[in-house]
Image (cartoon, grey):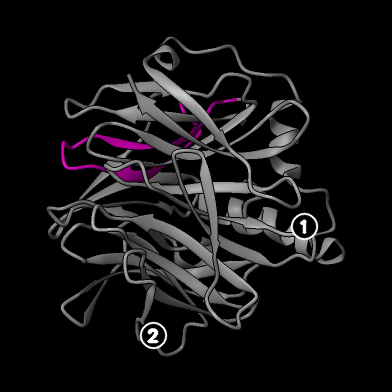
């Protein structure tokens, strides 16, 4: 039986689904997070003082997700409008620009590399296609759809142009049986984490660095999520100590990893793991739930948080 917990990829999709079609979601947006955190802001963590937090709010209903950040401070992500459409956006120095794949109702901007190349997914609620968007030339490049998988999710992209993502069955509201992939020189390579249970979700790669190391998360047969680091053919499981669930979502060129963990009460927090394996909790001030989804080579972070009123904000955290 599938878990009720909201994992980061499904968190964004589920929240979007709740706003897009409440009759299908059967709940208020962010129902799972609200039930977990009880609406009280978390105490500021000591590590928070190491960052300058900037909130990113796009126009429309209260849902914005900042997913990628590069070394120039260019942030990529997506938001919802009043009609329920999902738009990609680019943010830099306080200015937000909407960018949509022509003719589609869903544009999910995710990772962005230092050359300004964004990886994304576009389509509708039943079918998604992976692609890239060159921010300097304003051009789109399609990645081939993977046969048998209606959801082709582009998630992370390295500076060499190597991308990573997942191919999943299901739809925008409920995706499962996911396999991971990398896209390099016009060809896919597929992989699954060794302990992933396909029936409970499968393998979700989320980020790739300049050396081709991939991080993501998988769900095991006990419905517990674990982060992973894929380095060549070697997989290393990442679990924050004392956490009930862990997701690894960002990796930079200095072997720093960022992501989200759930404490024993079910509250989601952001974390950064340094190159020595030390974990540090990082939550924006006033957050009741946090997901860190990217870390650049400077150590800057991007992600989303929910405040005490239930509003979902994107954010970027610049390392001081």
Instruction: Inspect the magenta stretch and tell me whether residue 256 lies in it.
Output: yes
The location of residue 279, given as percent across then percent down, is 32, 23
**Location of residue 19 with respect to 270 vertically, above or below:** below
Left or right relative to 25: residue 228: left
Question: Residue 265: x percent and y percent?
Answer: 62, 25
- Local secondary structure at mark 1: helix
Classify residue 254 by image quadrant: top left
The mark total stands at: 2
Q: Nearer the viewer, residue 76 or 232?
A: 76
Residue 95 percent across, percent down from the top left = 52, 45
On the image, numbered disc 2 is attached to which residue? 146
Q: Quadrant of the C terminus?
A: top left
Q: Residue at x 73, y 37 (%)?
A: 311
In the image, 138: left or right of 84? left
Q: Is residue 259 above or below residue 40?
A: below
Viewer-proximal residue among 39 and 232: 39
Residue 102 visible here: yes
- Mark 1, Cα crowd under 10 Å, few <14 / some 14-19 / many 20+, is many
Q: Is residue 223 visible?
A: no
Q: Residue at x 46, y 49 (%)?
A: 67
User: How busy is the neighbourhood of tag 2: few (under 14 within 10 Å), some, or many (20 plus)?
Assistant: some
* Magenta residue check for 38: no
- Left or right? Give the position of 89 relative to 64: left
The residues colored magenta run: 242-264
Q: Residue at x 43, y 9 (%)?
A: 46
**Viewport quadrant of the N terminus:** bottom right
Q: Nearer the viewer, residue 95 or 281?
A: 95
* Residue ID at (78%, 29%): 309
The first of marks 1 and 2 along the sequence is 1
Q: In the rendered image, which residue does mark 1 sit on?
A: 19
Residue 17 point in image, percent of width and height: 71, 61
Dot 2: what SS? Answer: loop
């Amino acid at each position: 039986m599938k878990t009720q917990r909201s994992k980061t990829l499904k968190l964004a999709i589920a929240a979007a689904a709740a706003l897009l079609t409440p009759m299908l979601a059967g709940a208020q947006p962010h129902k799972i997070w609200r039930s977990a955190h009880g609406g009280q802001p978390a105490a500021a963590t000591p590590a928070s003082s190491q960052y300058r937090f900037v909130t990113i709010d796009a126009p429309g209903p209260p849902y914005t997700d900042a997913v990628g950040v590069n070394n120039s401070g260019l942030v990529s992500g997506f938001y919802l409008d009043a009609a329920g459409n999902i738009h990609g956006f680019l943010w830099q120095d306080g200015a937000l620009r909407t960018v949509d794949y022509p003719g589609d109702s869903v544009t999910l901007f995710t990772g962005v590399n230092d050359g300004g190349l964004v990886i994304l997914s576009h389509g509708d609620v039943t079918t998604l296609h992976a692609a890239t968007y060159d921010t300097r030339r304003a051009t789109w490049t399609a990645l081939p759809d993977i046969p048998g998988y209606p959801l082709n999710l582009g998630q992370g992209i390295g500076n060499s142009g190597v991308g990573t993502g997942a191919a999943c069955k299901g739809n925008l509201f409920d995706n499962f049986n996911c396999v991971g992939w990398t896209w390099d020189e016009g060809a896919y390579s597929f992989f699954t984490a060794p302990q992933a249970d396909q029936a409970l979700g499968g393998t979700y790669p989320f980020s790739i660095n300049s050396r081709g190391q991939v991080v993501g998360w998988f769900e095991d047969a006990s419905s517990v999520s674990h982060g992973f680091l894929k380095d060549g053919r070697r997989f290393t499981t990442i679990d924050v100590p004392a956490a009930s669930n862990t997701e690894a979502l960002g990796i930079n060129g200095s072997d720093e990893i960022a992501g989200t963990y759930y404490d024993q009460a079910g509250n989601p927090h952001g974390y950064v793991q340094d190159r020595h394996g030390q974990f540090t909790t990082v939550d924006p001030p006033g957050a009741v739930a946090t997901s860190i989804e990217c870390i650049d080579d400077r150590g800057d972070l991007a992600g989303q948080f929910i405040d005490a009123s239930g509003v979902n904000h994107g954010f970027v955290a610049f390392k001081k």
